[in-house]
Image: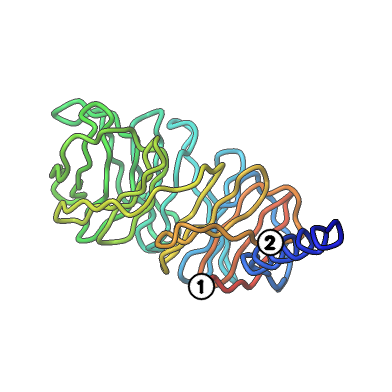
Amino acid sequence: MVIKKSVFILIINFFCFSTQAQEMIFATQLNKVLVSCYHFLGFDNQNNLYTLKNNILTKNSDSTIYQYNNLSLGKITNVDFQNPLQIVVFYKNFNTVILLDNQLNEIKKIDFNLHTTPLTIEAVALSSQNQIWIYDSISSKIGLYNVNTNTTKWISTMLENPILHYESDYTHLYWMDTNLDLFRISIFGAIEKISNHPKFDSVQLTKNGHSIYVVENQLFSYNLKTKKSSKIAIEEKIISKFFFKDGILSIFTQNEITNYKIILP
């Protein structure tokens, strides 16, 4: 009876191990790149590299290095470079957004302190048709700011919870609130709840219904439909920053970027 019980336990353990192994995503290392920066931001659709060091934004192309610095506005909070021709730089402490061209020349300065109605901007991202997404913490509403007419169109009602994390594409703004609920809103104001998300230290949404996130220096992929997480196997034990684009996962640690090829389930 003891032998049968032991065999049964071994079978159960083997089954659990096999199930866990199936949920592991293995990454193939492609290369390593040395960089001199404090913060790795990522790559745009032309594979230009964006970094921050001493509050200076740097763009590295194949042949040229561009930089932007504005000491009067303090610390850079967020950089949206999904369109390399119109880069959005957000200075939260000064309630200000700077638009840059592809050579990091300043195109426009938007000071929301000068808005006719007081605004406190907590989130900014690029949208379509010369508009940027904004989230105002005073009204708890999401709006579209037209950079040509300097006007704001509010497209949401008051959000129930503050925004914890946000990303955008040209037609939608995605955000996770403090309850880790993931939503998206279209440029027409239609709001959809997508999923609840596991806790994270940092996270990035992908284009195929997944997210990649880090918690306690462990890297995972999360399927937003099945609500299942899979661990991503990489060499790095400490992850300062990661970025995912077109099947390439870039891990930043100690002035070095390691690029991996991964296939999400």
| Colour setting | rainbow
Q: How many marks?
A: 2
| Lateral position of residue 68 relative to residue 124, left or right | right
Residue 42 sits above or below residue 117 on the image? below
- As drawn, is 165 to the left or to the right of 232? left
Residue 2 is left or right of residue 136, and the answer is: right
Tell me the quarter of the image containing the N terminus. bottom right
Residue located 28% across and 34% down the image: 111
Q: Nearer the viewer, mark 1 or mark 2?
A: 2
**Residue 226, percent across and down?**
44, 62
Q: Amino acid at mark 2?
A: Cys
- Of mark 1 and mark 2, the one earlier in the sequence is 2
The location of residue 231, given as percent across then percent down, is: 63, 59
Secondary structure, mark 1, is: loop
Q: Residue at x 57, y 74 (%)?
A: 263
Residue picked out by circle 2: 16
**Which residue does the image show at 46% across and 62% down from the upper left?**
210
Residue reaching furthest right? 3
Q: Dot 2: within a 10 Å radius of its alpha carbon, few (fewer than 14), some, or many (20 or more) residues?
A: few
Q: Nearer the viewer, residue 17 or 41?
A: 17
Q: Is residue 196 above or below residue 86?
A: above
Badge 2 element: helix
**Residue 67: assigned label:** none
Residue bearing the label numbered 1: 246
What is the C-alpha distance between the residues marked 1 and 2? 32 Å
Q: Quadrant of residue 206?
A: bottom left
How many residues crowd mark 1 within 10 Å: few (<14), some (14–19), many (20+)? few
The percent coordinates of residue 136 (x first, y second) are 26, 34
165 vs 180, nearest the viewer: 180
**Three-letter code, disc 1:** Asp
Closer to the camera, 203 or 32?
A: 203
